């Protein structure tokens, strides 16, 4: 009796079934892997904000006050009128307190709040003039090199924003309005932040009642102290995510046929180059978390003063007590405004 030959290979149908099963398993696994990676990135972002919060407390312990939101200078000599929107920002002054002392020494602001910085009180302008064709001094060149240096603690790992502000950039969502790649006006942009290292975090400047947040510019009044926070440290936002830009000359919301102007308000850690939105956000009614839009439609951002993150559904914030919390973008505006003001006496609801 002859034996049937033993089959040693899969049939084509069997192989297709196995491939299909593997495909299904991969399809089920990928979302879980992506969710785990995003959870890890969100945790790292929260750790960054925790380090910034600790840096604020250590700074206040060392100097008796909080760092200025922006070390602006008020006068009028042809450089954009008043210069209250120019100068080093609070993240620059925090460098020694987040283990970046060498970078701080390279910037060498050598001034504190009421003192000139040593180059006519216009640090950003002098760097800009040197970039535009002047002969930079060694001191200014060192500052420019420092300004281009990314600081890991100031960057959310979920953010897809450029690490250094580019000369031109295709803003998210611009293609939906028929404008394609949104090229920035190079001349305008070079006078702002081109090349500067960006940040994912800004200080809270206040709410609809005014500049009643933890971070004020020199022109707005005296530096803050934690004892000024009458609403309670655990109920007052100090720093939050704000990693986005918007295009000028667009309607709100953006519409087909808009002719966009230059991208404005790149968030940069060194300070305020003619724009305090590079360092601060607010919680006015017109400035909600995530700007009434999303990352993919950044072009639609309703305002340039918003907290904004690449985490779905909200953003991370450091509070004045050093705690870090995730706040959803569906939060009541009344509650959000109460959290942004430090002394308005508003009752904070659930969030």
Image: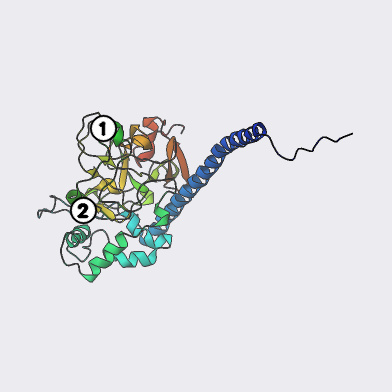
Q: CA distance from mark 2 to mark 1?
A: 26 Å
Residue closest to the eye, 287 or 131: 131
Residue 77 vs residue 100: left or right?
left
Q: Nearer the viewer, residue 62 or 270?
A: 270
Q: Position of residue 4 (x, y in %)?
A: 82, 34
The reply to whether residue 3 is in sight is: yes
Residue 198 left/right relative to 152: left
Q: Earlier in the sequence, mark 2 or mark 1?
A: 1
Question: Dot 1: within a 10 Å radius of its alpha carbon, few (fewer than 14), some, or many (20 or more) residues?
Answer: few
Instruction: Find numbered disc 1 in the image and state the secondary structure of the residue it sits on.
Output: loop
Residue drawn where x is 24% and y is 50% of the image: 221
Q: Residue at x 33, y 52 (%)?
A: 198
Picture coordinates of residue 181 (x, y %)? 27, 41
Mark 2 or 1, closer to the camera: 1
Residue 98: give x, y in percent of width and height: 42, 59
Q: Quadrant of residue 292?
A: top left
Mark 1 highlights which residue? Answer: 178
Residue 190 tag number:
2
Helix, strand or loop for disc 2: helix
Query: As displayed, is residue 346 above or below residue 64?
Result: above
Image spot of residue 310 (x, y percent): 41, 41
Residue 289 visible, this orientation = no
């Amino acid at each position: 009796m002859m034996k049937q030959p033993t089959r040693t290979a899969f049939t084509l149908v069997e192989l297709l079934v196995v491939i299909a099963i593997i495909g299904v398993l991969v399809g089920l696994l990928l979302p879980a892997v992506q969710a785990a990676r995003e959870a890890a990135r969100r945790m790292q972002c929260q750790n960054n904000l925790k380090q910034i919060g600790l840096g604020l407390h250590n700074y206040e312990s060392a100097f008796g006050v909080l760092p200025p939101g922006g070390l602006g200078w008020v006068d009028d000599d042809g450089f954009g009128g008043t210069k209250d929107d120019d100068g080093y920002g609070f993240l620059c002054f925090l460098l020694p307190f987040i283990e970046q002392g060498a970078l701080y020494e390279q910037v060498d602001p050598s001034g504190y709040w009421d003192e000139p910085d040593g180059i006519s009180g216009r640090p950003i302008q002098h760097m800009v003039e040197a970039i535009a064709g002047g002969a930079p001094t060694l001191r200014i060149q060192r500052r420019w090199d420092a300004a281009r240096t990314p600081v890991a603690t100031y960057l959310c790992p979920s953010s897809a924003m450029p690490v250094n502000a580019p000369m031109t950039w295709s803003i998210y969502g611009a293609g939906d309005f028929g404008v394609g790649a949104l090229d920035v006006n190079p001349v305008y942009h070079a006078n702002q932040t081109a090349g500067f290292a960006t940040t994912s975090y800004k200080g809270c400047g206040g709410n609809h009642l005014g500049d009643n947040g933890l971070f004020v510019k020199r022109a707005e009044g005296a530096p803050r102290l934690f004892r000024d926070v009458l609403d309670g440290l655990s109920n007052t936002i100090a720093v939050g995510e704000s990693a986005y830009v918007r295009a000028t000359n667009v309607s709100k919301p953006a519409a087909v046929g808009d002719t966009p102007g230059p991208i404005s308000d790149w968030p940069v850690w060194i300070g305020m180059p003619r724009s305090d939105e590079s360092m601060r956000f607010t919680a006015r009614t017109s400035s909600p978390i995530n700007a009434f839009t999303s990352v993919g439609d950044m072009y639609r951002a309703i305002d340039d003063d918003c907290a904004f993150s690449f985490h779905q559904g909200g953003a991370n914030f450091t509070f004045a007590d050093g705690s870090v919390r995730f706040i959803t973008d569906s939060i009541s505006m009344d509650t959000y405004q109460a959290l942004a003001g430090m002394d308005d006496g508003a009752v904070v609801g659930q969030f």
